[in-house]
Amino acid sequence: MSSSDAPEVFDFRKPQKDSPAPARLTQSVFFVGFMGAGKTSVTRKLARRVGVPSIDMDTFIERAASRKISQIFAEEGEAAFRAMETDVLRTLAAGEPQLVSCGGGIVLAAENREILKTSGFVVYLQVTAAEAASRISNLSSRPLFRDLENAERVIKEREPLYEEVADVSVDTSGRGSSALAEIVGEILKEKGILWQPK
Ligand code: S3P
């Protein structure tokens, strides 16, 4: 086979002419909101789309503890989980800028609210209990969801806390995670938090 017949090998190490440089974040962006608001999928989608790092707090805690959140709740109780959550938040807030998907109860502790307000930009994804229930495929993985009535009550209780930490609130009703990633991406660009090096 002559060298001209050889298949072209794609070299991932070479910067590709037409691929834009990955975007940069000037500060971390924390996604808050009730379970089922789409924090995890919106964070992941936006991070992939623009090429910035992201992390999901619940997944991080599950890996660190080698257990599912529901197991941590059952074996050690909610207070132990909340303490882990604050530790992780403190660590992430002090680290490199990234997109952070927070657990729905992150706003319950005053200490966490203070960290969120002083360590980055906070996006509140608003959701109704009915829409949240329709989005969560496995309700048993969320020990605090229980039923619709309870979810409605908890959302009402937490609303002022989400509002307190939010730099921007986005209504998620009727919107999928791709559309929401697009909306949030535009907001972050407009604010100069997400930018594209030339
Ligand atoms: C919780 C929400 C969950 C998880 C835990 C407690 C809450 O995270 O942290 O089950 O108190 O609302 P998601 O909001 O990612 O489901």
Image (cartoon, rainbow, N blue to C red):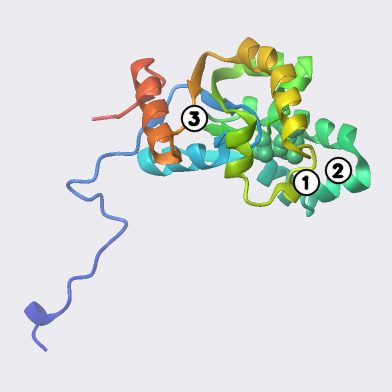
Q: Is the residue marked 3 within 8 Å of ligand 1, measured from its CB?
A: no
- Sequence-wise, which precedes: disc 3 or disc 2? 2
Q: Position of residue 93 (x, y in %)?
A: 63, 25
Which of these two is toward me, 125 or 80? 125
Q: Position of residue 42 (x, y in %)?
A: 49, 37
Q: Position of residue 49 (x, y in %)?
A: 37, 41
Residue where numbered disc 3 is placed: 173
Question: Is 29 located above or below residue 8 in the figure?
Answer: above
Ligand 1 is found in which quarter of the picture? top right
- Sequence-wise, which precedes: disc 3 or disc 1? 1
Residue where numbered disc 2 is placed: 73
Q: Is the residue marked 1 within 8 Å of ligand 1, measured from its CB?
A: yes
Q: Nearer the viewer, mark 3 or mark 2?
A: 3
Q: Is residue 73 left or right of residue 30?
A: right
| CA distance for labels 2 and 1 | 6 Å
Residue at 48% across, 22% down = 170
User: Which image quadrant for residue 196?
Assistant: top left
Give the position of the C terminus as an image quadrant: top left
Q: Secondary structure at mark 3?
A: loop
Question: Is 143 located above or below residue 123 in the figure?
Answer: below
User: Which image quadrant for residue 109?
Assistant: top right
Give the position of the N terminus as an image quadrant: bottom left
Residue where numbered disc 1 is placed: 69
Q: Quick check: can you spot residue 104?
A: yes
Q: Secondary structure at mark 2?
A: helix
| CA distance for labels 3 and 1 | 26 Å
Which of these two is toward me, 74 or 17? 74
Residue at 89% across, 47% down = 74
Which of these two is toward me, 142 or 165? 142
Q: Residues within 10 Å of mark 1 (few under 14, many from 20)?
A: many
